[in-house]
Amino acid sequence: MVADFVAGFARLVATYPDQIRVEAHDGDEVNEIVLYANQADVGKLIGKEGKMIGAIKTVISGCKAKDGKSYRINVEPLS
């Protein structure tokens, strides 16, 4: 659910939405979401001073109240 939201949002912001890929790794207390994007889109997804990725983290932090798990998001360039 959260990974789908992150992927959908990233596709709206990205210049190359067809190259967006999301991997979710479930842990005991922290779920990690890795967002892979074209090198040109990495800066857009992080935003100035990390404000864009910070906003995404704020939105999904509401999920912590629902399921009790924390989420960590990393943005990586495609290799």
Image (cartoon, rainbow, N blue to C red):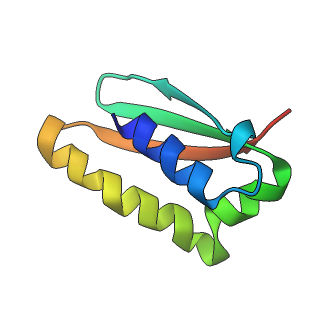
- Residue at 74%, 63% (x, y): give it: 43
Instruction: Tell which of 62 and 17 is nearer to you.
Output: 17
Horizontal side of 61 relative to 11 (left or right) equals: left
Image quarter in which the C terminus is found: top right
Quarter of the picture holding the N terminus: top left
Q: Residue at x 47, y 65 (%)?
A: 54
In depth, the one of 40 and 16 nearer the eye is 16
User: Where residue 45 sits in the image (x, y, percent)?
Assistant: 64, 60
Image x and y of residue 39, in percent: 84, 50
What percent of the width, then of the height, locates residue 10?
58, 51
Q: Is the residue 51 above or below the residue 57 in the image? A: below
10 left or right of 54 in image: right
Relative to residue 11, is residue 73 drawn left or right? left
> Residue 3: x percent and y percent?
44, 36
Q: Quadrant of residue 34?
A: top right
Above or below residue 52? Residue 56 is: above
Give the tally of numbered discs. Answer: 0
Residue drawn at (53%, 42%) of the image: 7
